[in-house]
Image: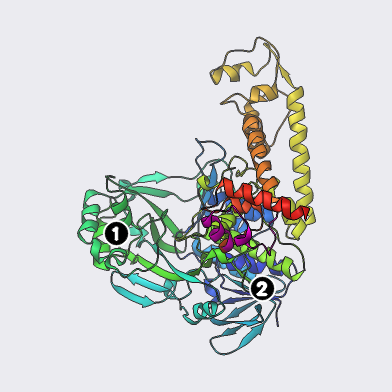
Amino acid sequence: MAEVVVVGAGHAGVEAALACARKGHDTVLCVMNRKMIASMPCNPSIGGPAKGIVVREIDALGGQMGKTADETALQFKMLNTTKGPGVQSLRVQSDKVKYSEKMQEICANQEHLTIQEGIVEELLCDDHSICGVRFQDGSEIHCQVVILTTGTYMSSSVMVSDHVVESGPDDQPTTQRLSESIRSLGLKTFRLKTGTPPRVLTESIDFSKTSEQPGSPQRVCFSYETKETLPYDQQVLCYLTYTTPLTHQLIRDNLQRSSMYSGVVKGVGPRYCPSIEDKLVRFADKERHQLFLEPESLEMDTTYIQGFSTSLPYEIQEEMVHSLPGLEHAVIKKYAYAIEYDAIDPLQLLPSLQTKAIKGLFCAGQINGTSGYEEAAGQGLMAGINASLYLEGKEPLILKRNEAYIGVMIDDLVTKGTKEPYRLLTSRAEYRLLLRHDNADQRLTEYGYQVGLISEERYQAYQKKMIQIEQIKQELNQLRFTAKSSCNSYLIECGYESLKDGVTAYELLRRPKLELIPLLNGTELVVDPDLARQIEIEVKYEGYIEKAKKEADRLIQMERLRLPEDINYEDVIHLSLEARQKLSLVRPLNVGQASRISGVNPADIAVLAVYLQQRHQK
């Protein structure tokens, strides 16, 4: 008997299991092979645009991914540094072997957490409430909560051209019966597709024909608790190469031999991470496509060809790889393939990630229609937190769209659904200036502390930091520079004229190009570099940030208008036919969520507001 059973030990499963166990709930993590815990079957990296901010959010809430990514990184790189702070994010090149091994170690040593090897084939329910799971060998574990984090392993098929094998990633087993069990409980499933590129022997690459892609020289990391990172001069290089006309000709000549175009694939593939053949069809005007060469691990002599996912036959893959600059004589260690798998329609989920049909059944990760390790981990953490709160008889933690990318993702899934693998993008967040890399702790540490995943020591350190920031801002408002101040040489260096009148440091910091630390050079005020960057952003973008907060406040007001659980939308007069259908399907919790449903227009929202007012008056 356990309180929680987590099915699947990928990035979602690990975060879910650790969250439940760290909150003191006896948890069983079910995995087919414990050596595959938190494996990286696709790209050997963590983070990226929007995704890197999700990892920061996971850390701010008390999750594990950021800490392990920092500890096992081969390279740290801050992306979009020439753009605004709302789109800057961190990406690390990971040692995929070390990352998985570290997560295995953490799970094995976590109190209240037991790792159970085996294939779960059936969910056990009693009167629409979960009560356990049954394994392939007939054994059972009874519990109060099940969290499904099956990734791409549920009823999965690996495809290369017209050759199809029932298998999970990396030659791991799959099961058809779990999908059948889920459907027997009244949940809808659908097919999705993703893929992976070839891996080649590193020693067989001529890197002189490629461009070096180093990391960032400044110290950056995911976790607020990370004290040391791999020094810049010890970090590995990635490399950039491009497809050629010959590459494109080979693909076009063999397009019908691709699983995607031969009719073998039934699921929908990821729009924002397409196969190379899909890129050529969709972007036919492009003369070339960039490809990144990324090391997989210091323990493996293999390089991952980022952006070269394909399901063409092996012999065509050989020719394609050899058509790339620097890879003319490359030896393929692992061929590319496509994989198709079962996912559930996320419209069947509450914002807590509990299913509407079965009490105590939560779902997280690619089973909910998402793609990416980071999206999976963010959902896994939230499912683990809310499963624990469910056991404790407490209200779930629902992150708002102005509070976290995780909140944006979950709201998109449960409100709009998805027909293709969902990927987080900065463009999905209407308040992205509020959801920055630098301020994840300000947004979420309080929540992590309240749910019990942030220690008292860490919480006190966070509060001290917030006090420091306000104190520094006050000192900047009091510190005045004049025509005789030492900062004038820095102003001239940045293209400004020398000061003629007195001005505060706070006012000067508003100016473009000016940075806080060199501005304060020669003064008695000393600021930590990490704090300096955050203060710069808050001061320079103060007006924009305040505007975004006011817009978010209007959203919050709509979120407070809760919709009754028993509302019958057919009885709400003046609602459009499409709104009735969509509202009845999604069953939004509040007017704010209702406003984001495709097909529900502003006039329908006004009708709902009047309906609620009239119902309240009765």
Classify residue 478 by image quadrant.
top right
Q: Is residue 393 left or right of residue 514?
A: right
**Disc 1: which residue:** 330
Asked whether residue 229 appears in the rendered view, the answer is: no
| Nearer to us in this view, 544 or 332 | 544
Horizontal side of 64 relative to 196 (left or right) equals: right
Q: Position of residue 253 (x, y in %)?
A: 19, 59
What residue sits right under mark 2 in the picture?
A: 359
Badge 2 crowding class, 10 Å Cα cut-off, few under 14, some 14 to 19, many 20 or more, is some
- Give the mark nearest the N terminus, 1 or 2: 1
Could you say which disc has been placed on residue 21 in the image? none
Which-is-in-front pick, marks 1 and 2?
2
- Residue 363 visible in the current orientation: yes
**Mark 1 surroundings within 10 Å by alpha-carbon count, few (fewer than 14), some (14 through 19), many (20 or more):** many
Please provide the residue range marked out in magenta. 562-584
Please report the residue visible at 58 percent of the width from the left and 45 percent of the height from the top.
220
Name which residue lies at 59% across and 77% down: 30
CA distance separating discs 1 and 2:
52 Å
**122 sits to left or right of 339:** right
Image coordinates of residue 93 in percent, x first then y, are 49, 54
Callout 1: helix, strand or loop? loop
The answer to whether marks 1 and 2 mark residues whose Cβ atoms lie closer than 8 Å is: no
Question: What percent of the width, then of the height, locates residue 280?
Answer: 29, 52
- Give the structural element (helix, strand or loop) at label 2: loop
Instruction: Assess whether residue 582 is covered by the magenta stretch.
Output: yes
Q: In the rendered structure, does residue 591 fall within the stretch colored magenta?
A: no
> Residue 317 appears at what percent x and percent y?
27, 63
Name above or below for residue 573 compared with residue 167.
Answer: above
Residue 322 lies, with reference to residue 515, above or below; the image says: below
* Quarter residue 533 falls in: top right
Query: Extreme top residue here?
Result: 500
Amino acid type at circle 2 is: Lys
